Image (cartoon, rainbow, N blue to C red):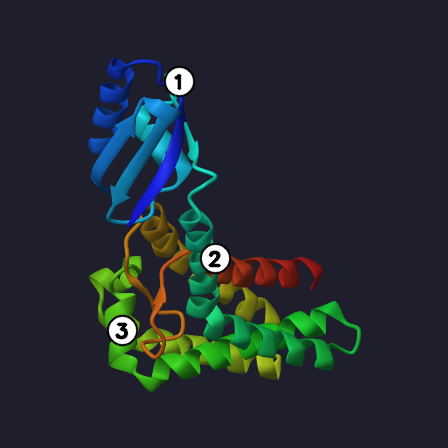
Amino acid sequence: MTHSYTVAGITCEGCVAKVKSKLLMHPDVLAADVKLEGQKATVTMQRHLSITELQNAIGNDTKYKISEDATDHSHHTMKVEESRSWFATYKPLLLIGLFISGVAFLTADGSLHTGMNTFMAGFFLVFSFFKLLNLKGFADSYAMYDLLAKKVPAYGLVYPFIELALGVAFLTGFNPTFTNWATIIIMGFSSIGVIQSVLNKKKIQCACLGAVFNLPMSTVTIIEDLLMVAMAAYMIAIH
């Protein structure tokens, strides 16, 4: 993909050469054409680079400041496509979340405690269901990032049943203190591997919905895990 930019601060051919050289040093920049006239830069990249990434490549402590070229409408198109892509990617997860939230709201009868309990029951039951549809596929994906599943692959085969048990426990009201503490420990530990993968920018599949949907690992997965931890902690606090 190729986009045009304006680079303020270019005043001579030396500036042109310097900015071009800096841009070409970025591993994702395939070609760069910088012109003194109009202070323009045309950059061809193998993936879309943000303005921040391009500015970092040029240097934040220099006089050169890069910005989008107002006449290049491809930037707007790219943003629209990225937005659509995000919603298309996470549509299954969003729909499931909305359905579970709807059921929790309708059955809460004005009680936050009841609503949260129902939400957590629905969350674990539904998510374990999708994992069990392809147990081996889930275990293989889970072992890519979970700290325990990496060392003990069998844990990936057991994990969906742990979620199923938690779902049943929340649904039946079995020993709330034990159930909530188990949720904090299990989901909290699981989130560690997720956070590490996201911070390391690993492009791997998220196994939250098993191997049925091809969901990428992202901050959405972190929020999902830590939300369960936060809810369980709240339930213990008010118990």
Residue visible at 32% across and 52% down?
197
Instruction: Locate residue 171, reporting x and y percent.
Output: 59, 82
The answer to whether marks 1 and 2 mark residues whose Cβ atoms lie closer than 8 Å is no
Crowding around mark 2 (Cα neighbors within 10 Å: few <14, some 14 to 19, many 20+) is: few
Q: Is residue 68 left or right of residue 45?
A: right
Quarter of the image holding residue 3? top left
Q: Amino acid at mark 3?
A: Ala
Residue visible at 50% across and 66% down?
183
- Tell me the SS state at disc 2: helix
Crowding around mark 1 (Cα neighbors within 10 Å: few <14, some 14 to 19, many 20+) is: some
> Where does label 3 land, which residue?
139
Crowding around mark 3 (Cα neighbors within 10 Å: few <14, some 14 to 19, many 20+) is: many
The answer to whether marks 3 and 1 mark residues whose Cβ atoms lie closer than 8 Å is no
Quarter of the image holding residue 64? top left
**Residue 97 numbered tag:** none
Q: Quick check: 49 above or below 183?
A: above
> Where does label 2 land, which residue?
80
> Where does label 1 land, which residue?
9
Residue visible at 37% across and 29% down?
55
Instruction: Locate residue 189, reporting x and y percent.
Output: 40, 57
